[in-house]
Amino acid sequence: MKFTDKYSKEVKAYYYFPTFGPSVLALIKKEVIIQGYVLEIDRGNDVYILSANPFSSCFFCGAAGPESIVELKLAKDHPRFKMDEVVTFKGILKLNAVDIYQCNYILENATVYR
């Protein structure tokens, strides 16, 4: 993934906007299986991120880039997760290059893969 600095009129700030490579573009709307550290961002609103790194060195703490996280869109009846729990998920990959309020990678219909 490559990033371009673009100005967002909506928030009056510059943001990194991604350009996805061919190997990632080939996975759009396909079922993928991915493992990482679960980060509970907002339990009340059911916002979870899957990270290549534990919380202490994740993207939000400055040690990695936005390409190292996946936003999880989980079913309402999903199990509870512990911070930094290593979990494997299965779901449909969605790519996001325009909405600054969502991650670049989104795993829709994400379920725990055993």
Image (spheres, rainbow, N blue to C red):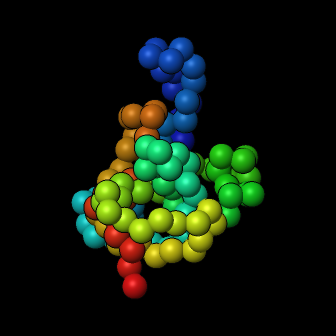
80 on left or right of 77: right
Q: Residue at x 36, y 55 (%)?
A: 73
| Count of numbered marks | 0
Q: Quadrant of residue 24?
A: bottom left
Q: Residue at x 57, y 74 (%)?
A: 86
The C terminus is located in which quarter? bottom left
Residue 68 in view here: no
Residue farthest to the left?
29
Whole-percent x and y of residue 52?
60, 65
Name the one closer to the observer, 26 or 58: 58
Whole-percent x and y of residue 97?
40, 40
Q: Residue at x 41, y 57 (%)?
A: 72
Residue 62 vertical position relative to residue 14 in the rendered view, above or below:
below
Q: Residue at x 52, y 66 (%)?
A: 81
Q: Quadrant of residue 32?
A: bottom left
18 on left or right of 84: left
Whole-percent x and y of residue 111?
34, 70
109 on left or right of 104: left
Residue 76 in view here: yes
96 on left or right of 38: left
Name the one closer to the observer, 80 or 35: 80
Residue 102 vertical position relative to residue 91 in the rendered view, above or below:
above
Whole-percent x and y of residue 14?
57, 24
